[in-house]
Image (cartoon, rainbow, N blue to C red):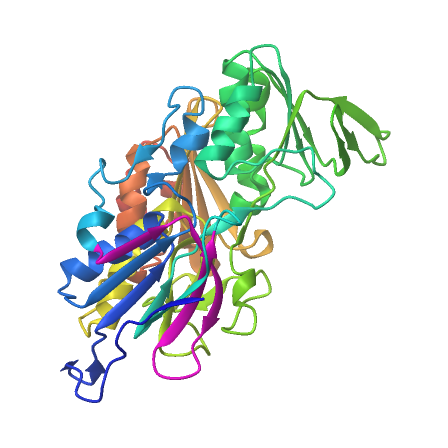
Amino acid sequence: MGRVPVPIVPASAPTRGRVVLPRSVLVVGAGLAGLRTAAELRAQGFAGHLTVVGAEDRAPYDRPPLSKELFTRTEPLWLTAEGYGDLGELADRVLLGRRARRLEADGPGARVTLAPAVPGAGTEETLEADVVVLAVGAAAARPASWDHALTLHGADDAERLRGRLVPGARLVVVGAGWIGAEVAGQAARHGCEVTVVEAAPTPLHRQVGAAAGALTVPWYAAAGVDLRCGRAVTAVRPDAVVLAGTAREPAEEVTADVVLAATGVRPATAWLAGAVPLTAHGALPVDAAGRVRGGPPSVRAVGDCAEMTTPDFGAVPGGHWDAALSHPAALAAGLLGRPAPPTPVPYVFSTQLGHDLTLVGQPPADDDVEVVVRGDVAAGFTVLYLRAGHRLAAGLTADRPRDVAALRRLLAAGSHPALDVGRASDPEVPLRRAVL
């Protein structure tokens, strides 16, 4: 086994205030979160040894176009070309096509054992650093028995799916979340016969709640997509998806040429079990600076693999592009003893079935929220999520971009202003004028 040591910080390491500054950082993960971590470290003055490791053998690329532009963008959108940073310029060493297998952080610094992502393509090696930043992302979730279902998370997945979705193909999408809805709309427009199966009562039920999710139901029929909500999948075969029966509908089979499992993602953290704390869903529980709660001081986490808890929004799960883009700034600041920037408001953008959706903030659970709809549901609307006292917790816009900036301003810096419900529900009244 090869071993590439990077010096551990000695007692005479430089400090800023009471913070011992690292002389070496190892970033595990070469997606957006890993790239932005490297860029922020350098931008904030880190001059030590920086290593970045990635499981894929490609340079960092943007993932949202994989579903939003499945048929119109057939090559990865490289993050370097988009101005997010160049690993070759930022890092002293870049190792792509290497998968992390083991983390040891029981002393000063930390060690990560790597193996080739493709078995037989090399030997294991162990890297050491003062600080390890885990930006390992997530992987598409797919039940073990669904061997015939495709997933969509990486560039190879997109290429495989695109090759199967020829005009006239019968596609069954299991899951009406962000990715499922995006692909369904793209495939229907491409000439495929599309059915979407969702176990919850509405699309986007987990992401935006039942009331808001129900407002998107008419979009499916308008796009030529057959939506089946409240239907659980019991089996996936090469030529069909088997649906469980309900009180009103018998069990049935939906014929398919292609099945896409769009049932969410899971943090790619199985290899970390026992080394650092993980939540019940396998995420790394972190604060706004990426420190792992109950974990060793030499380990930080950011991006899709992390669940960040803040006083303003509670536990915010990873899995969204904006978090991977913005959260590395606070992580780098914490490592380098600099003032941390304000925690950004959670933000998600989706283009699905011919509509633009933006979610700002963290919607509370359905039983702990008042939902106010402003605008014309057919032409464009905003859903406001209000806590007790009519305090704004989040907002979902659909084809109503004028409310996005207002929501971000109102929720910035931990603010949850109380709203006049009557004025807030009037689409002609600017949201700022609905604040009490």
**Which residue range is magenta in the image?**
91-116
118 to the left or right of 313: right
Choose between 9 and 369: the one closer to the eye. Answer: 9
Could you tell me how many numbered marks the image carries?
Answer: 0
The image shows residue 345, relative to residue 193, as above or below, that is below
Q: State left or right for residue 306 relative to residue 76.
A: right
- Quarter holding the C terminus? bottom left
Which x, y percent locates residue 209?
Answer: 56, 45
The reply to whether residue 316 is in sight is no
Q: Position of residue 11 (x, y in %)?
A: 21, 89
Q: Quadrant of residue 9?
A: bottom left
* Image quarter of residue 251: top right
* Vertical side of 380 occupied by 38: above or below: below
Viewer-proximal residue among 112 and 174: 112
Query: Furthest-bottom residue in view?
Result: 11
Instruction: Please report the residue visible at 50 percent of the width from the left and 37 percent of the height from the top.
Output: 178
**Is 54 placed above or below 78 here?**
below
Q: Residue at x 15, y 83 (%)?
A: 17
Q: Residue at x 52, y 48 (%)?
A: 139
Q: Is residue 83 magenta?
A: no
- Residue 110 in magenta stretch: yes
State the predominant SS element of the stretch in magenta: strand
Name the quadrant of the N terminus.
Answer: bottom left
Q: Is residue 285 visible?
A: yes
- The image shows residue 51 at horizontal and vertical percentages of 28, 60
Q: Quadrant of residue 252?
A: top right
Reply above or below: 326 against 26: above
Question: Would you say 415 lies left or right of 197 here?
Answer: left
123, 281: nearer the viewer? 123
Q: Is residue 175 left or right of residue 155?
A: right
